[in-house]
Image (tube, grey):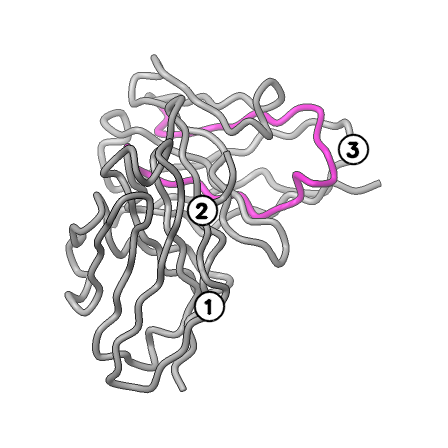
Amino acid sequence: EVQLVESGGGLVQPGGSLRLSCAASGFTFSSYWMHWVRQSPGKGLVWVSRIKSDESSTSYADSVKGRFTISRDNAKNTLYVQMNSLRVEDTAVYYCARGNSFMDVWGKGTTVTVSS
Amino acid sequence: QSALTQPASVSGSPGQSITISCTGTSSDVGGYNFVSWYQHHPGKAPKLMIYDVSKWPSGVSNRFSGSKSGNTASLTISGLQAEDEADYYCCSYADSRTFVFGTGTKVTVL
């Protein structure tokens, strides 16, 4: 079964850091681009970042550029996002998703709460 | 990177057809044929319904169809069913190798 499972969410203070993970199974992870997408409470989906299958290309939303870093370990079938200088407005459910120009497989998300 | 504009809500009776619009700019919707649509039931993983403007992923009903004209993309749901009640989001590839989602539309089946 094709599956993505996010982990690493939690409560963090403003200015803090957190690293989210996304474990992939059921497909050849190293062949696919991957995304992070988030949804703040009561709001819509927002694209965060994308990484190419071989990690040679990354892109970010302006709202996280310079603070978030997307990466992957193809040997471990795992996608990451390192989130630094967290702000209250980064509070959201974070989803990982598979795909290049569209997202055809999604995880169920992990919740990040930034609060003092 | 402003969100694409969608109507906040659309409703219809079972069996009817509804259309959700998604308006962007020439830097996103109008500039690329990489518009996708997602169905999202709160608390669950979003589901891909349409990709590359009008293509169906495997397993998605052909009651869902997509199109694009200029800077506006559209999702049409035909033969509306109770199970179609959900939030729907469009998404487009955009300049600078980024993506932008729509504001989201809540579909209600009356």
- Residue B4 location in percent, x, y? 45, 46
Q: Residue sitting at 29 percent across and 86 percent down?
A: B14
| Element assignment for label 3 | loop
Along the horizontal axis of the image, is A51 left or right of B1? left
CA separation in Å, label 3 and label 2: 29 Å
- For the residue marked with disc 3, what is the amino acid? Pro
Q: Which label lies toward us, 3 or 2?
A: 2
Along the horizontal axis of the image, is A83 left or right of B86? right
- Residue B35 location in percent, x, y? 29, 44
Image: B87 above or below A32? below
Q: Which mark is residue A14?
A: 3
**Which quarter of the figure has residue B10?**
bottom left
Q: Which label lies toward us, 1 or 2?
A: 2
| Element assignment for label 2 | loop
- For the residue marked with disc 1, what is the amino acid? Lys
Q: Which mark is residue B48?
A: none
Q: Does the magenta-highlighted stretch encompass residue B33?
A: no
Mark 2, residue position = B4
Where does the magenta region start and end?
A: A76-100
Mark 1, residue position = B106
- Residue A32 location in percent, x, y? 26, 30
Q: Which label lies toward us, 3 or 1?
A: 1
- For the residue marked with disc 2, what is the amino acid? Leu
Task: Residue lying at the far top in this picture: please name it.
Answer: A56
Q: Residue sitting at 47 percent across and 57 percent down?
A: B104
Q: Are marks 3 and 1 in contact (CB under 8 Å)?
A: no
Along the horizontal axis of the image, is A85 left or right of B3? right
**Which quarter of the figure has residue A26?**
top left
| Element assignment for label 1 | strand
Image: A85 above or below B47? above
- On the same chain, marks 3 and 2? The answer is no
- On the same chain, marks 1 and 2? The answer is yes
